[in-house]
Structures are given as C-alpha cells and as structure tokens.
Amino acid sequence: MTIDELDAAMRNWARWAHDKVRPEQDIPEPPIFQAWRPIGDARDAGWGDPVPGDRIDDAIDWAAAEALDRVLLRLPVSRWYTLRRHYFIHATQPEIELQACLRALGDLLHPIRLALCA
C-alpha cells in the first residue's frame, strides 16, 4: 500500500473510532455551555478547526476500520501512540516520524494483503 492509501485508511479508522467513542445520542448540550467563553478575547488560531482531509460526512467503511484496528494493536507502542495522536487526537507529529509509522503499518499489512490475494 502507498502512503496515501495508508493515510486514507487511518482517516477512515479515526472516523470509526470517534463514532465508537461518542455515538450520536440526540441529547442536547447542557445550557450552561452556551455561556462558556475561552480565556482571553479569542481562542487560539486553528484550535478545534477541522483538519483538512477529515471530512466527518465521509462514509465509514466499518469492516476495513475494524480490521485495521486489529492490525494497529500489533504495532510497537511508540508507533501506535504516534499514529493515534495524529489521526485520533489531531496532535501535530513530526512528518518524518509519521511517515515511519505509516511505513511500519504498511509492513504489517503487506503479508496480510499477500495472503488475501493468494
């Protein structure tokens, strides 16, 4: 798989993980939160804004996300933590570290894809 395919798979996994953590329950937000204002005049620029490429309205491929979730558990903890922070928590990670983590994920997926194609 290419880095772009792995990135798309991880974004699908992140949408799946967010949906699993906080499913839509049709519960209104408590009124007290309408009065909440961040400290200072405005919030930090970019904080809470959607990350480009993370369109929440994209359909979730549940089967692929669940399969990827099982594979992610086989990664070394440091690699798994970096991917989780980048895709799930949206914390900025160094590009070289992120690329290395995606390559490690690709290395894990390669034998699985070969077995499925045979």
Image (cartoon, grey):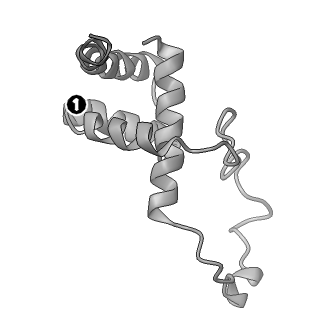
The percent position of residue 34, horizontal first and vertical second, equals 76, 81
Position of residue 37 measured from the top left corner of the image (x, y, whole percent): 73, 73
Q: Name the residue under label 1.
A: 75
Is the residue 56 above or below the residue 109 in the image?
below
Q: Which of 83 and 18 is in front in this view?
A: 18
Q: Is residue 52 above or below residue 88?
A: above
> In the image, residue 98 lies at what x, y percent?
42, 23
> Residue at 39% of width from left, 34% of height from top?
83
The answer to which image quadrant residue 64 occupies is: top left
Q: Quadrant of the N terminus?
A: top left
Q: Where is residue 86 in the image (x, y as percent from the top left)?
A: 47, 37
Report the quarter where the C terminus lies.
Answer: top left
When asked about the image quadrant of residue 68, the answer is top left
Is 32 situated left or right of 93 in this image? right
> Is residue 92 at all visible to an observer of this figure?
no
Asked if one can make out residue 69 in the rendered structure from this viewpoint, the answer is yes
| Side (left or right) of 94 relative to 115 | right
What residue lies at 46% left-to-right and 22% top-to-bottom?
6
Q: How crowded is mark 1: few (under 14 residues within 10 Å), some or many (20 or more)?
A: some
User: In the current view of this chain or complex, which residue is farthest to the right?
Assistant: 41
* Image position of 78 (left or right of 1): left
Closest to the observer, 43 or 29 = 29
